[in-house]
Image (cartoon, grey):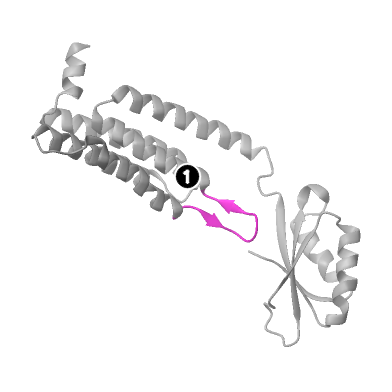
């Protein structure tokens, strides 16, 4: 055990290589789980974040070791905040009230902290965090597969006469009390069409996506209906 701590706690060539390898393996494990489930940031992104964070942490430790006046935690703190910008790139907004990628963004941030722990030689924390994060993501992914994650659908519709707006609105509200309707620009490019978008909750109807779009087309006054993305 003393040899182990000497190897990872001392600051030498072997220790640096070990810390980088550990950051690579742990970041890769988390990225593998994300990539396997088809998320935008996979094994390469998570590995690079972890390695970069480990390197940044070791730079801070090295600068302190050679005797320069600096705050060792400053570089690490900048890494933690900087990863937030990378995480934003994995978050996608699809229409209204549909946001994806938050878990991957959070996982990227966590991979950065694992890299910092590896770079600092705190291997126990790095390994423990990797095990917990991977287990949580795997368990929660399997549970989410049993739940209808996307509980809503947005349908873009167009009316050919402004006088039909109120009547169509009342008809939709009568059949779908939980519907949310917004006025939007026309997408068809047909002159004088009035555009609306409606958010339907799947739990409040027994219709599927295709059936719901077809039903919208059957309403009097609605001349155009497609799923909005």
Q: Position of residue 214 (x, y in %)?
A: 81, 66
Q: Position of residue 4 (x, y in %)?
A: 20, 17
Instruction: Describe residue 178's horizontal placement relative to residue 61 as left or right.
Output: right
Residue at image location 50% in from the left, 53% down from the top:
91
Work out whether 203 lies above or below 218.
above
Residue at image location 29% in from the left, 35% down from the top:
116
Highlighted magenta segment, given as a residue range: 89-101
The reply to whether residue 147 is in sight is yes
Q: Residue furthest top?
A: 1
- The quadrant holding residue 157 is bottom right
Instruction: Describe residue 50's horizontal placement relative to residue 177 as left or right.
Output: left
Residue wearing tag 1: 104
Q: Position of residue 14 (x, y in %)?
A: 13, 28
Instruction: Describe residue 217's horizontal placement relative to residue 199 as left or right.
Output: right
In the rendered structure, does residue 204 fall within the stretch colored magenta?
no
Q: Main secondary structure of the magenta part?
A: loop
The residue lying toward the viewer, choosing from 78 and 43, is 78
Residue at image location 77% in from the left, 50% down from the top:
202
Locate the C terminus and report the quarter of the image it occupies: bottom right
- The quadrant holding residue 97 is bottom right
């Amino acid at each position: 055990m003393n040899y182990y701590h000497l190897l990872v706690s001392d600051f030498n060539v072997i220790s640096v290589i070990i810390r980088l390898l550990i950051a690579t393996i742990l970041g890769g494990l988390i990225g593998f789980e994300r990539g396997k489930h088809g998320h935008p940031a996979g094994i390469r992104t998570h590995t690079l974040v972890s390695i970069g964070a480990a390197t940044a942490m070791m730079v801070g430790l090295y600068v302190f070791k050679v005797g320069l006046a600096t705050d060792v935690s400053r570089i690490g703190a900048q890494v933690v905040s900087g990863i937030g910008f990378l995480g934003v790139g994995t978050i996608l907004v699809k229409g209204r009230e549909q946001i994806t990628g938050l878990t991957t963004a959070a996982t990227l941030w966590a991979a950065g902290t694992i890299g910092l722990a590896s770079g600092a030689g705190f291997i126990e924390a790095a390994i423990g965090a990797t095990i917990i994060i991977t287990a949580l993501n795997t368990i929660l992914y399997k549970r989410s597969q049993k739940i209808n994650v996307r509980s809503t659908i947005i349908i873009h519709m167009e009316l050919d006469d402004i006088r039909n707006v109120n009547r169509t609105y009342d008809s939709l509200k009568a059949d779908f009390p939980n519907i949310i309707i917004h006025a939007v620009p026309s997408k068809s490019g047909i002159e004088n069409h009035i555009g609306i978008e409606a958010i339907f909750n799947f739990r409040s109807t027994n219709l599927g996506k295709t059936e719901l779009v077809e039903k919208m087309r059957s309403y009097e006054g609605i001349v155009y209906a497609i799923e909005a993305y």
